[in-house]
Image (cartoon, helix red, strand yellow):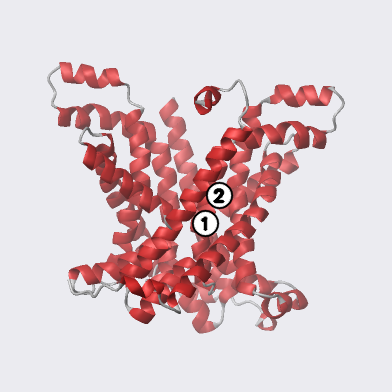
């Protein structure tokens, strides 16, 4: 193969197809972040709450998901969701659900740390002004916690963006799988994988720069 | 829900054998990767904090590159691209002559990737050791490498033990990506049992429990180690001694 030389023209030829893959990657990243954060917040609140059985259940959930690889979680949901629902829901939804439930465990730890970082006097003061427990959480604790944990959340978002490439294990056509298809079909692994690596590198580096920049803005 | 439970399948051959084999491959892969990552990552971490701008540049670039490309893409580069762009004889060796090419490639990839994360941890460790002890060692006539070898790094390792342990656990989990190039590690064996028997719940539950057992074992060992190597006079020391 190396005797044939390189053919970088393969990339512009397949750009529309690769862009479709990238759109799926971006959609998966956005939805996994959103869903993971929602369930993660619920888990964090449950863990910090006074109802012991719920706190314990949330702790078990978080520790189980944190001890297995994401690939195993993807296989779990890819297999389990159709069995539970009685009908297949397609690779995209299976992978998305796997990412949401998996990432929720990591988000819950970030959010828990953020909530614990809010001074307890703030809660007492808010309660003293007559706010209910829910209002305290919604208007006093969470806004401060979210600001404190924004840099960590952004780092996690970049990790998720990169990890969605593991959708390749169930053949969902994300960016990597789209490139994979072309690499196999046209026998051009060098060009395709180099291109994929560069795109991920540039996007992740830009996101990292953005995260660093926002951190600086926050401190000022 | 229509599902026929059969937990007994996990104790039947060949499935039990597959799980044991998968567990052994996962452990071996992770240990080989770790033994590449720890020295390499330490070296890169030292370079990132070095005085020489060249060393800092190399260390910084290494971390930037290995942390910003998804690990599975890195694995494809090592496995599908590297043999093609190397000189012909070297490429031939990687593809044809090297024993267990998938396992070795996955271990090297995992090792180089993990090194970038260890580098960040070790750099932080070196910073928290502080310049005082290194300057004292230099003033007493130690060379730069002796200072790192005998003074700075032993302290940095002990300070950074908790993040290093969590990184060690991450290697076991990351080793599962080796299945994308055909290594039959634990996750792949569970997946294979599911495809042969359709007993997915049992197979994936077995893998989940085995990964959990690895974590629990490593954490238990780490607690003993942490107590052994703790440094006196630090905030953590009083609590740890209870």
Q: Residues within 10 Å of mark 1 (few under 14, many from 20)?
A: many
Residue nearest the viewer, comparing A91 with A47: A47
Residue A196 in sight in this render: no
Residue B146 in sight in this render: yes
Which quadrant of the rendered structure holds the N terminus of chain A? Answer: bottom right
According to the picture, the residue beneath numbered tag 2 turns out to be B168
Q: Which mark is residue B172?
A: 1
Q: Residues within 10 Å of mark 2 (few under 14, many from 20)?
A: many
To the question of a shared chain for discs 1 and 2, the answer is: yes
Q: Chain of mark 2?
A: B
- Looking at the rendered structure, the secondary structure element under dot 2 is helix
What residue lies at 22% left-to-right and 32% top-to-bottom? A50
Residue nearest the viewer, comparing A157 with A89: A89
Q: Position of residue A181 (x, y in %)?
A: 46, 78
Q: Position of residue A38 (x, y in %)?
A: 26, 46
Residue nearest the viewer, comparing B152 with A23: B152
Residue nearest the viewer, comparing A89 with A154: A89
In the visual, does B124 lie left or right of B194? right
What residue lies at 36% left-to-right and 75% top-to-bottom? B9
- Looking at the rendered structure, the secondary structure element under dot 1 is helix
Q: Are marks 1 and 2 in contact (CB under 8 Å)?
A: yes
In the visual, does B92 lie left or right of B228? right
Q: Is B164 situated above or below A175?
A: above
Q: Chain of mark 1?
A: B
What residue lies at 27% left-to-right and 32% top-to-bottom? A142
């Amino acid at each position: 193969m190396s005797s044939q030389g390189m053919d970088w023209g393969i990339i512009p030829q397949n750009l529309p197809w690769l862009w479709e893959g990238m759109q799926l990657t971006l959609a998966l990243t956005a939805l996994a972040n959103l869903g993971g954060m929602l369930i993660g917040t619920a888990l964090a609140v449950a863990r910090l709450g006074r109802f012991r059985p719920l706190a314990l259940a949330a702790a078990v959930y978080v520790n189980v998901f944190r001890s297995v690889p994401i690939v195993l979680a993807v296989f779990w949901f890819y297999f389990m969701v159709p069995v539970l629902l009685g009908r297949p829901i397609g690779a995209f939804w299976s992978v998305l659900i796997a990412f949401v439930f998996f990432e929720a465990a990591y988000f819950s730890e970030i959010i828990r740390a953020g909530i614990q970082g809010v001074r307890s006097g703030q809660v007492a003061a808010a309660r003293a002004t007559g706010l209910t427990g829910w209002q305290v959480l919604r208007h006093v604790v969470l806004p401060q916690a979210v600001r404190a944990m924004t840099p960590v959340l952004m780092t996690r978002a970049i990790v998720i963006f990169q990890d969605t490439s593991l959708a390749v294990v169930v053949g969902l056509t994300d960016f990597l799988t789209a490139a994979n298809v072309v690499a196999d079909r046209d026998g051009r692994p060098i060009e395709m994988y180099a291109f994929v690596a560069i795109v991920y590198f540039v996007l992740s580096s830009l996101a990292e720069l953005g995260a660093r920049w926002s951190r600086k803005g926050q401190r000022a | 829900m229509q599902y026929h439970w059969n937990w007994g399948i996990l104790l039947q051959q060949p499935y039990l054998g597959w799980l044991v084999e998968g567990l052994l491959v996962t452990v071996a892969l992770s240990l080989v990767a770790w033994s590449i990552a720890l020295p390499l990552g330490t070296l890169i971490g030292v370079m990132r904090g070095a005085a020489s701008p060249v060393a800092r540049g190399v260390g910084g670039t290494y971390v930037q590159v290995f942390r910003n490309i998804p690990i599975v893409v890195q694995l494809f580069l090592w496995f599908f691209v590297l043999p093609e762009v190397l000189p012909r004889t070297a490429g031939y060796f990687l593809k044809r002559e090297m024993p267990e090419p998938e396992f070795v490639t996955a271990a090297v990839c995992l090792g180089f990737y993990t090194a970038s994360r260890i580098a960040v941890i070790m750099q932080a460790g070196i910073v928290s050791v502080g310049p005082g002890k290194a300057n004292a060692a230099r003033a007493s006539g130690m060379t730069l490498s002796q200072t790192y070898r005998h003074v700075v790094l032993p302290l940095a390792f002990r300070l950074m033990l908790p993040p290093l342990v969590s990184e060690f656990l991450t290697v076991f989990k990351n080793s599962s990506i080796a299945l994308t190039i055909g290594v039959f590690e634990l996750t792949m064996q569970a997946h294979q049992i599911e495809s042969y028997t359709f007993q997915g719940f049992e197979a994936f539950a077995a893998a989940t429990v085995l990964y959990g057992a690895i974590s629990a074992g490593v954490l238990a060992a780490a607690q003993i180690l942490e107590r052994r190597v703790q440094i006196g006079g630090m905030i953590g020391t009083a609590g740890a001694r209870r």
